[in-house]
Amino acid sequence: MKGESATMMSRLKSKNGLIAIIIIFLIIMLLARGGSRPREFYGIIFDAGSTGSRIHVFRFTKYGSEDWKFQDELFEYVLPGLSAYSENPSNAAKSLENLLNRAKEYIPEKHWTKTPISLYATAGLRLLSERKAEEILEEVRKLFRKFPFAFHDESVKIMDASDEGLFKTLGGDQTIGAIDLGGGSIQITYVPKDREILKSSADLLHKVSAMGYTITAYTKSYLGLGLMSSRLRMLRGHESTSKFSSVCLPEGYSGVWVHQNTKYNVSGKAPKASRFQECQQLVLDKVLRDDIYVNPDFSRTKFLLLSYFYDRGNSVNLFSGLEAQVQPKNYLDMAKRICDDKLNQSPKRFLCFDLIYLGTILQEGFKFHATNNFDVGDLFQ
């Protein structure tokens, strides 16, 4: 075990960021063989999104000459995201401390120094200035150095827009593609089969090779089309005010919505006819005004929907459990019911818009059929 761990860590030291993590997953889940006694391997990954930070602690085992097998995972999260601490970077790091202590409790002490730890920040930090984002990342590095895990400074970084989708698709081995809806952006990633797409989309393709295996993945990110950013687009359009009234919010509702450390006074208003139809038209006119490029083989690809696709659907009992399926029309059918209710409770104020947006971006944005079946789940579950 010691020799193999050392070899794996040497590979880590020779690579940077995302590629190192991908190689770990490829080695563990597909390629590693040898040995005659039970072994364990742990890995820690922080997914620092725009609305919260999530820790994933993975445990893999192998017996004799069998492949490494995923056994279980510790998954916890904290709110808000790191970008909320732009004026106090040390507090950004402190927000992760309890999650790290939970990782120490979960991982046996003998494995601490062999457990790699990484943090990948997504759209939230990309929207900050470079200086403020780097100040937060440096405080996180300082915190990680205090813990006994295998850490290198380059393992804390802001992911490139294209990296996010690549990371989440290749992090698991059960799906061909993934559509991940975060707070600030949406990414689509899959392994294309069409040779013409491979030729025409060279700038969006990423090849990852490890121990004789090569995967070519198409990944594209749309910054500004995440759920929280889309709420702001719906409310504001091209205006620059901080006070909005929208038919997508419940009639009679009035309150404060905080996004990227800015407070917005928001209120609902009565529709002229159908709240659902009028709100969906706002989504089409204000939010999805930018074209989403649709590859011809999207409809032939089995996609997993991640993050807010799961969170919002789960909040209205659209499906149960982590291994669920959903169709775009399911989001829209539920939206029709929700939009007609007078949901003026604060936690539910955006449900009408959120569900319309989820169904509409799948149907009108990515051009999936209303009855296209998707697997849906929380990240890495």
Image (tube, grey):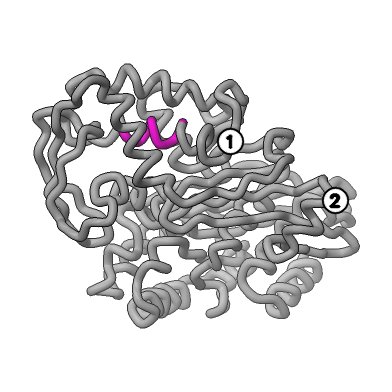
Q: Nearer the viewer, residue 261 or 105?
A: 261
Describe the element under mark 1 as helix, strand or loop: loop
Q: Label the magenta part by its dominant secondary structure.
A: helix
Q: Residue at 73% across / 55% down in the picture?
A: 217
Describe the element under mark 2 as helix, strand or loop: helix
Q: Within the magenta stretch, is there residue 3? A: no
**Residue 251 falls left or right of residue 351:** left
Q: Which image quarter is the N terminus in? A: bottom right
Is residue 38 at all visible to an observer of this figure?
no
Please state the horizontal and vertical placement of residue 258, each as a whole percent of the image: 21, 53
- Look at label 2 and name its amino acid: Arg
Q: Quadrant of residue 94?
A: bottom left
Q: Which residue is identified by label 1?
A: 367
Going by the picture, which residue comes out furthest to the bottom?
131
Within-10-Å neighbours for mark 2: few <14, some 14–19, many 20+: few
Q: Which residues are magenta?
A: 353-359
Q: Which residue is identified by label 2?
A: 195
Q: Residue at 19% across / 24% down in the picture?
A: 272
